[in-house]
Amino acid sequence: MLEKSKFDDILEMVTRRVASRTSRRGFIGRVGTALAGAALVPLLPVDRRGRTSRPAHAASGGREGWIPQDQDTKQCDYWRHCSIDGNICDCCGGSLTNCPPGTRLSPSSWVASCYNPGDKQSYLIAYRDCCGKNVCGRCGCLNTEGELPVYRPEFANDIIWCFGAEDDAMTYHCTISPIVGKAS
């Protein structure tokens, strides 16, 4: 027969004392409160000042020689596409700021700060997916400037943002890249 150790006796005493002073409902309530509080953490304000594209970064070629240009909006190296992951709507019947006919704008977006070499300013871009048709398949780009893992969704461009769209509009088609404002 196994002999109980001093540790087992202490653990049993503490467990019995806690069990006699708390209820299951109270414990479940505290766990629920902790989970709800943890779920609200991503909604807290985020300081994005350190994440702006810098002119020095763009002038040095950025990642793997990528240098933004401000002439051809249908190219992956167009400055507004610094963090796009998908098809450019400008190639799919839409524009930089409007979805193509027959698609709907997703209700959510991811953001990035992109450097415009034309006016030497950085701008905040809110990438939004256009949903409701099959994938466009033209002008596919994978740019990762400032991208963070999916647990920071406001900077994750790997997410299909059509998940909040109505009815049958959950299918990804292309991505627009409107300017939200100047990055400071």
Image (spheres, rainbow, N blue to C red):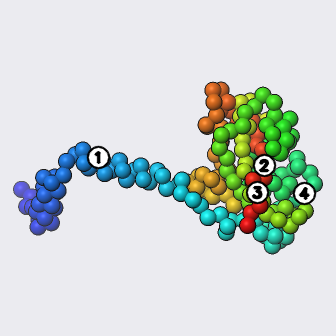
Q: Left or right: where does residue 28 sit relative to residue 170?
A: left
Q: CA distance from mark 3 to mark 2?
A: 9 Å
Mark 4 and mark 2 in contact? Answer it, CB < 8 Å.
no
* Sequence order check, earlier mark of 4 and 2: 4
Front-most of residues 57 and 182: 182
Q: Position of residue 57 (x, y in %)?
A: 79, 70
Which element type, helix, strand or loop, lies under badge 4?
loop
Mark 4 and mark 1 in contact? Answer it, CB < 8 Å.
no
At label 2, the amino acid type is Pro
Front-most of residues 6 and 39: 39
Pointer 1: what residue?
28
Pointer 2: what residue?
178
Can residue 126 be seen here? The reply is: yes
Pointer 3: what residue?
181
* Sequence order check, earlier mark of 4 and 1: 1
Pointer 4: what residue?
70
